[in-house]
């Protein structure tokens, strides 16, 4: 395995053991609301500190952008970290959450790790070297169109500004596809697209740490990731579509007419 990916895997495993120690015991945690419907506990913070500790030890000069503690340092290498993606699920004992760690160099994604500690599933990718689930190579599904396609999404629950536009997309995609799932961890949703468990995924209003790693997984598994107009500004805007090449094109065609004029791509 690429040495940088190995460091990210080590960091993800440490975070995973912190997360699993308190899983199902949310009543013992101190939970606070960062903003409306945006919760955080000491598990998120401790997992993040563990990840940062491993990365700093290996790469003291690299910059870090982490969900709970923000930006650290300035460098052309940037680690983008979500220590616990799916906090709402985690706090309810709903078994779907993950750890997401990506490394970018001058804005280009180079390494990715998404870890599901419940199933001990480690998804990794390095640019140009493909994507793996544990030691199995990943490939997006070969779904040609909507018939039979299983899609993933995230229903807006913090910022409701684009709810109507989102519901219009949901309605059209529900009519076209075989089914839609809202599992609750965007990083894992992308990993599932990379693994062919979902044929496609879209969501509005994500943060870079939710899907930087997931985006590289999908691309390295042969899929396409774009913003909701089909362009390449998804990491800036957080409005994103991911799927295999052909289904991606069809998803853009269904979603684009509903994209509000004032949304960032
Ligand atoms: C959230 C999850 C969720 C997505 C939200 C994210 P968090 O991350 O990825 O699936 O719908 O937009 O913010 O807050 O649990 O790290
Ligand atoms: Ca997240
Ligand atoms: Ca998080």
Image (cartoon, rainbow, N blue to C red):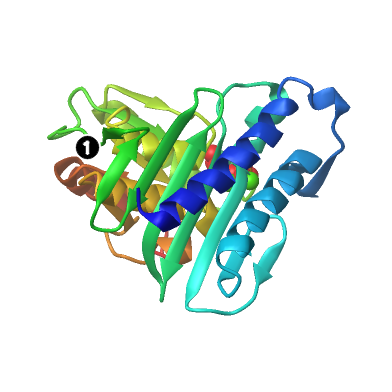
Q: Residue 47, percent across and down?
A: 69, 44
Residue under the image location 63 percent in, 63 percent down = 56
Instruction: Residue under label 1, please give it.
Output: 139
Q: Nearer the viewer, residue 227 or 10?
A: 10
- 231 vs 212, left or right, is left
Q: Residue 157, percent across and down?
A: 62, 41
- Choose top left, top right, bottom left or bottom right for residue 212: bottom left
Q: How would you rate the neighbour count of disc 1 (Cα within 10 Å): few for under 14, some for 14-19, many for 20 or more?
A: many
- 158 vs 12, left or right, is right
Residue under the image location 59 percent in, 79 percent down = 74
Q: Nearer the viewer, residue 138 or 249?
A: 138
Q: Residue 111, percent across and down?
A: 39, 56
- Which SS class for mark 1? loop
In the image, residue 65 sits, relative to residue 185, either above or below, namely below
Residue under the image location 14 percent in, 43 percent down = 246
- 229 vs 50, left or right, is left
In the image, residue 217 sits, relative to residue 80, either above or below, namely above
């Amino acid at each position: 395995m690429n040495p940088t990916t190995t460091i990210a895997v080590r960091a993800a495993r440490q975070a995973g053991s912190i997360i699993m120690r308190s899983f199902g015991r949310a009543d013992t945690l101190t939970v606070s609301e960062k903003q409306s419907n945006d919760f955080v506990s000491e598990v998120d913070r401790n997992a993040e500190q563990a990840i940062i500790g491993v990365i700093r030890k290996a790469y003291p000069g690299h910059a870090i952008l982490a969900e709970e503690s923000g930006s650290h340092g300035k460098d052309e290498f940037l680690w983008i970290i979500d220590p616990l993606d799916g906090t709402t699920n985690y706090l309810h004992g709903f078994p779907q959450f993950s750890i997401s760690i990506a490394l970018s160099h001058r804005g280009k994604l180079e390494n990715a790790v998404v870890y599901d500690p419940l199933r001990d599933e480690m998804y990794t990718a390095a640019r140009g070297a493909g994507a793996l689930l544990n030691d199995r190579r990943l490939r997006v599904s070969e779904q040609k169109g909507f018939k039979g396609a299983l899609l993933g999404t995230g229903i807006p629950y913090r910022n409701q500004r684009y709810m109507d536009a989102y519901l219009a997309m949901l309605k059209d995609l529900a009519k076209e596809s075989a089914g839609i799932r809202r599992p609750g961890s965007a990083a894992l949703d992308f990993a599932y697209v990379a693994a062919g468990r979902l044929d496609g995924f879209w969501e509005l209003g994500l943060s870079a740490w939710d899907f930087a790693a997931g985006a590289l997984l999908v691309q390295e598994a042969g899929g396409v990731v774009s913003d909701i107009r089909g362009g390449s500004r998804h990491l800036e805007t957080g409005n994103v579509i991911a799927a295999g090449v052909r289904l991606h094109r069809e998803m853009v065609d269904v979603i684009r007419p509903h994209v509000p004029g004032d949304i960032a791509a």
